[in-house]
Image (tube, rainbow, N blue to C red):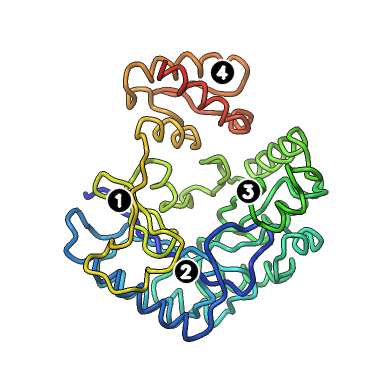
């Protein structure tokens, strides 16, 4: 059986920019959306015959808000990917904001082969949604999930955000309970990160006015416990799923699998190298090869393996590392395990939920020891 290969398609259109968002997105009229869809299809088709290409095990439509394109364009894009090659059991995900899709549109996407929906809820608290600049309300989230199930989607995910201004543990747990009541099979719980240049970064300079580290940690651990208690297993720092519903595409990122990314700001790890399309204009320009316009992304594979593996519940396999890095990792992780921040596995160590909260410090210590 061939190794998994993912395809990421970036759709850079949104109805409005959320106040915390630093992803590449912009408004686009019908003409712009049609032109971009055509450019993306040309790039997809140009993948044919690429050395090392094999049927895609997953396709992920991210953004932006992919569903702003409308069902017809999304189906054309998926059809182009299928023409290049889709595995029979491919996971096909599309991100959606509540109120950008309806039941008929979702049913059309499901018939076309989309089988996973990721809904950007962020919160079930109206005040938090307004603060984030979201265009939907809690009932829109519930309606979107209900419509997705009625349209035939069985694998539906919701996003929630933690560490928001004024957010308390009871308020977090209220959103978690509301998310669970929708019946979704997957939930992502991300801590707010203030990105430079965003309105929220300007409103809360240096994080002033946000919950402090201890308050955010309490909220994260409370959410993780509630989700685990409801049968959603934590498989990555921010991701929880019912058995068999972990996002296969995102697992490629965390396990150093191969994937191809198309669109401005899209990254690839393919053919033994990392590269990306910059955010600026040029993606729609004529090209002679599919990756024209990309820039190399310099990375250290050993560092990546440590950083990404310790994001996952499976943890770090010490045998996958160079001897000096493995020794450093074993020393650091044994020490933090004594404090309840890590636990041994058959092949190495994994971090506990408490360890996930300080993973950056743990990883930095491993890398410093391994390079000294």
| Residue 285: percent from left, percent from top | 33, 73
Residue depicted at 40% across the width and 65% down the height: 263
Quarter residue 290 falls in: bottom left
N-terminal label among 2 and 4: 2
| Residue 95: percent from left, percent from top | 52, 65
N-terminal label among 3 and 1: 1
> How dense is the environment of label 3, judged by Cα within 10 Å: few (below 14), some, or many (20 and up)?
many
In the depicted structure, whether residue 143 falls above or below residue 331 = below
Q: Answer whether labels 1 and 2 touch (C-beta < 8 Å).
A: no
> How dense is the environment of label 1, judged by Cα within 10 Å: few (below 14), some, or many (20 and up)?
some
N-terminal label among 4 and 3: 3
In the depicted structure, whether residue 240 falls above or below residue 306 = below
Q: CA distance from mark 2 to mark 3?
A: 23 Å
Residue depicted at 77% across the width and 37% down the height: 212
Residue for badge 3: 189
N-terminal label among 1 and 2: 1
Q: Evaluate whether residue 142 shows in this view.
A: yes
Q: Evaluate whether residue 173 shows in this view.
A: no
Element class at badge 1: loop
| Residue 192: percent from left, percent from top | 67, 48
In the depicted structure, whether residue 97 falls above or below residue 224 = below
N-terminal label among 4 and 1: 1
Residue for badge 2: 11
Element class at badge 4: helix
**Relative horizontal placement of residue 245, taking residue 175 as reference (left or right):** left
Q: CA distance from mark 4 to mark 1?
A: 33 Å
> How dense is the environment of label 4, judged by Cα within 10 Å: few (below 14), some, or many (20 and up)?
some
Residue for badge 4: 337
Q: Answer whether labels 2 and 4 touch (C-beta < 8 Å).
A: no
Element class at badge 2: strand
Numbered badge on residue 4? 1
């Amino acid at each position: 059986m061939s190794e998994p290969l993912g395809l990421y398609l970036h759709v850079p259109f949104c109805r409005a920019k959320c106040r915390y968002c630093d992803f590449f997105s912009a408004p686009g009229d019908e003409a712009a959306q049609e032109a971009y869809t055509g450019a993306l299809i040309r790039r997809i088709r140009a993948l044919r015959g690429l050395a090392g290409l094999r049927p895609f095990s997953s396709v992920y439509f991210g953004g932006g808000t992919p569903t702003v394109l409308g069902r017809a364009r999304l189906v054309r894009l998926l059809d182009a990917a299928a023409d290049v090659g889709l595995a029979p059991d491919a996971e096909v995900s599309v991100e959606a904001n509540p109120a950008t899709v309806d039941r008929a549109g979702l049913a059309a996407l499901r018939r076309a082969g989309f089988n996973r929906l990721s809904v950007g809820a962020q919160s079930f608290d109206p005040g938090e949604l307004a603060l984030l600049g979201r265009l939907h309300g809690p009932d829109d989230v519930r309606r979107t999930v209900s419509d997705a199930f009625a349209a035939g989607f069985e694998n539906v995910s919701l996003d929630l955000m933690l560490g928001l201004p004024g957010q308390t543990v009871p308020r977090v747990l209220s959103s978690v309970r509301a998310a669970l009541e929708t019946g979704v099979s997957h939930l992502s719980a991300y801590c707010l990160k203030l990105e430079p240049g965003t309105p929220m970064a300007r409103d809360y300079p240096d994080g002033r006015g946000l919950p402090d580290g201890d308050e955010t940690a309490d909220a994260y651990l409370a959410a993780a416990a509630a989700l685990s208690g409801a049968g959603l297993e934590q498989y990555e720092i921010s991701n929880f799923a019912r058995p068999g519903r972990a996002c296969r595409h995102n697992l490629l990122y965390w396990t150093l699998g191969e994937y191809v990314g198309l669109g401005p700001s899209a990254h690839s790890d393919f053919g033994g190298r990392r590269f990306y399309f910059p955010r600026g204009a040029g993606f729609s320009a004529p090209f002679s090869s599919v990756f024209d316009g990309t820039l190399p992304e310099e990375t250290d594979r050993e560092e990546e393996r440590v950083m990404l593996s310790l994001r996952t519940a499976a943890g770090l396999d010490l045998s996958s590392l160079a001897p000096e890095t493995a020794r450093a990792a074993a020393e650091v992780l044994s020490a933090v395990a004594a404090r309840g921040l890590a636990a041994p596995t058959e092949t190495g160590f994994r971090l506990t939920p408490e360890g996930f909260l300080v993973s950056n410090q743990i990883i930095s210590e491993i890398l410093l020891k391994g390079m000294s």
